Amino acid sequence: MKVFIITLFPEVIQTYLNTSIMKKAQEKGVIFFSIIPLRDFGIGKHRQVDDYPYGGGPGMLLRPEPVFEAVDSILKTGENPHKIFLSPQGKRFKQDDAKNLSKKDSLLFFCGHYEGFDERIRISLADEEISIGDYVLTGGELPVLVIIDAVARMVEGVLPKESIESESFYDYLLEYPQYTRPAEYRGMKVPELLLSGNHREIEKWRKQKAVERTIERSAIL
Ligand SMILES: C[S@@+](CC[C@H](N)C(=O)[O-])C[C@H]1O[C@@H](n2cnc3c(N)ncnc32)[C@H](O)[C@@H]1O
């Protein structure tokens, strides 16, 4: 999978993508990330990317020209990625979206900043707009990392299949409780059954706990 990210703050994105599972996914050749600094397409000597909103109002908006040109620079290479624009006004991101996006060959993310972006950018360029929740962040850099991380985990070859399938939301259930060593800590004991080596019974217990936890927390129901 190829993932293009247009951002004003490449260093923020780069640091995360060079860490842990994202780094390994690149080393395995499963995912290829390309970070495109929006400033490279800025206007004039100062590489301006933003301007005042017509009609007045607070803050600055991202201008259309740098964004259109940044997107054109990708299209010119023959790539035709699915274009996702980060916005608090977008569709709320869920695990199913991560699953669906993980099946695409190529994705392009555009991170907004300041007061957001000129409406013409949204109308002409976005295949979809995604929000990571009903709150407003300063920019699209944290949201894009949240989405990329969730998507990358679902791309074949990034993680072992079993570890994805047992996790919360995969089958619409939350994950069962998990324990590691020591078997007893400050008087709190690991359930006896998990130490028994009886894998059939352990599997049954995990399924039951996953259902109980899901109902208890009403995460899906
Ligand atoms: C300060 S926000 C702009 C908010 C915009 N003025 C509004 O009220 O809808 C700047 C940028 O951060 C990103 N952003 C902020 N909150 C977000 C969220 N919940 N989900 C996705 N992106 C978000 C978007 O890219 C947005 O263009």
Image (cartoon, rainbow, N blue to C red):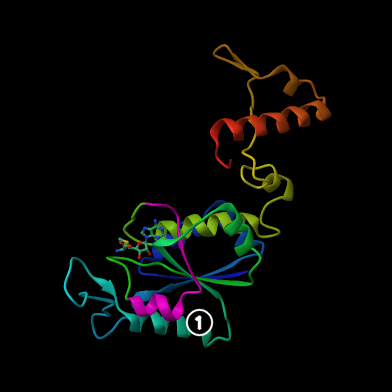
User: What residue sits 64% from the left and 56% below the top?
Assistant: 154
Residue identified by numbered label 1: 74
Residue in front for this viewpoint, 93 or 75: 93
Q: Quadrant of residue 178?
A: top right
Residue in front for this viewpoint, 63 or 34: 63
Q: Quadrant of the C terminus?
A: top right
Report x, y in % for residue 143.
43, 57
User: Is residue 163 rendered to the left or right of residue 132?
Assistant: right
Q: Quadrant of the N terminus?
A: bottom right
User: Is residue 186 rendered to the left or right of residue 63?
Assistant: right
Is 147 contained in the magenta span?
Answer: no
User: What residue sits 70% from the left and 46% below the top?
Assistant: 165
195 above or below 94?
A: above
21 above or below 109?
A: above
**Residue type at numbered disc 1:** Ile
Report x, y in % for residue 111.
40, 67
Report x, y in % for residue 197.
80, 24
Q: Residue 41, can we see it?
A: no
User: What residue sits 16% from the left and 73% below the top?
Assistant: 56
Residue in front for this viewpoint, 55 or 138: 55
Is 123 contained in the magenta span?
Answer: yes
| Chain part drawn in magenta | 119-134
